[in-house]
Amino acid sequence: MPTELSLAQKQQFLKDGFIVLRQVVDKELTWRARRAINVHTQKTGTLRPYHDFESTELPDLMNRSDLGAIIRSAMGPYDAPQTAFAAVQYPIAAPARIPPNFGWAPHVDGWWYSPDLPRTPGEVDSWQAPRTEHFGRADASEIGANMTPFFQDPDCTLSIGSFTAFVGVALNDQTEFGRGNLALLQGAHEKVESFFQMQRDAGGIVGPEGPGWPRLQPVGNNGVQFTSLPPSIAEDFLDTAETTEDGRVWLKPSPVLLDEGDAVIALHACPHNVTMNLGADPRLNVYFRLRRKRPGQQPTLGDSDHPDREWNGGFLDFDEGYNPWKASIDTMCDHWSDWDGMQEVVAEARTAGRL
């Protein structure tokens, strides 16, 4: 197995914002990881979709396979992951009406989440920056159900966490759409980067509550939901979207059809989400969130969407002179700067006016 991306793969990665690698993780490693997940579930009685637990079997999917070398060649140095998270998508009873694309609704990782929202538009005090009781203190000390802070920095200027690579490894067959597949918004990564550049240049907040990104939005006939993707980015993909009777708009994804041992590498800026599983078996994936090493940063564990904070939201100590919030914003506004092995392809595309 090659331990670096080919030129064609790099060009595809540049264009799409993600790349699929076939049979890059040995079946012995996927078997051990699958067993570890099932043993953990049996031991704890936990059937949550996401399992964060201590194990060597999950990090081994990266650390003991060619996948780690491929990412190091493409991205550069990174901390070998100590943790990962098992994403289990259980089968569900087929609804009377299956929504388009098996219910796929894209997001960019790193924003604060809570299941407790205003139920109707009439309960919302502000779509842009809501401050009802549902949002607690609404500052950097407020931690969401996903363990992500409401704001990353104490000055409340960065409301989204970031990392370099989102990496998934399949532990079973997902080669048919409708089996709980991961799906991505192909090619949206450059639009996301441009959006972050606009927010940065406008001053103020970068992320939700910043220019062009209200934290909440109306949905359907009388609902409320988080704005998981800036509206201007979603609008660029409306030509292939479907609208259902309740008024909800469903963007069309690129489903990732993986088999056991396959992997997907995506940029933080590539919107993604899971889809319904109408198959017979749980879909089993293991995900990593990796960050290229930066001078002055703290070591990263391998699974957090807010690596400038502790997993539980606490503040980290950084070297004097290192501003983690500025460093993160700078990289969000130039995501390929974190990918050493992509620089020649990126430079050629920029010279040719394709980037």
Image (spheres, helix red, strand yellow):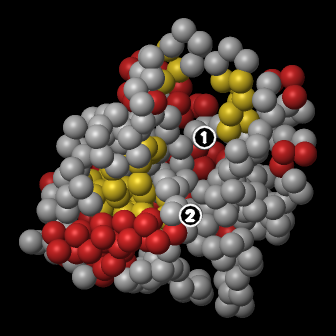
Residue at the top extreme, as displayed: 245
Choose top left, top right, bottom left or bottom right for residue 67.
bottom left
Q: Is residue 135 above or below residue 33?
A: above
Q: Left or right? Give the position of 350 relative to 208.
A: left
**Residue 97 coordinates in the image, percent (x, y):** 44, 16
Q: Earlier in the sequence, mark 1 or mark 2?
A: 1
In the image, taking residue 341 as reference, residue 155 lies left or right, namely right
Element type at mark 2: loop
Query: Can residue 262 be seen at all in this image of the molecule?
Result: no
Query: Residues under labels 1 and 2: Cα distance?
Result: 15 Å
Residue drawn at 57 percent across, 19 percent down: 248
Give the percent coordinates (x, y) of residue 79: 43, 83
The furthest residue to the bottom? 320
In the rendered picture of this protein, how many numbered marks are placed on residues?
A: 2
Residue at image position (34%, 56%) is 284
Q: On residue 196, which mark appears?
A: none
Judge whether 235 appears above or below 104 on screen.
above
- Amino acid carrying label 1: it is Ser
| Nearer to us in this view, 109 or 194 | 109
Element carrying mark 1: loop
Mark 1 Cα within 10 Å, few/some/many (few <14, many 20+)?
many
Residue at point 46%, 72% (across, down): 43
Residue bearing the label numbered 1 = 228
**Circles 1, 2 touching at the beta carbon (< 8 Å):** no
According to the image, label 2 marks what residue? 305
In the figure, is residue 137 to the left or right of 151?
right
> Percent from the top left, x then y, of residue 161?
62, 61
Relative side of 268 to 71, left or right:
right
Query: Can the viewer see residue 42?
Result: yes
Q: Position of residue 179 (x, y in %)?
A: 31, 40
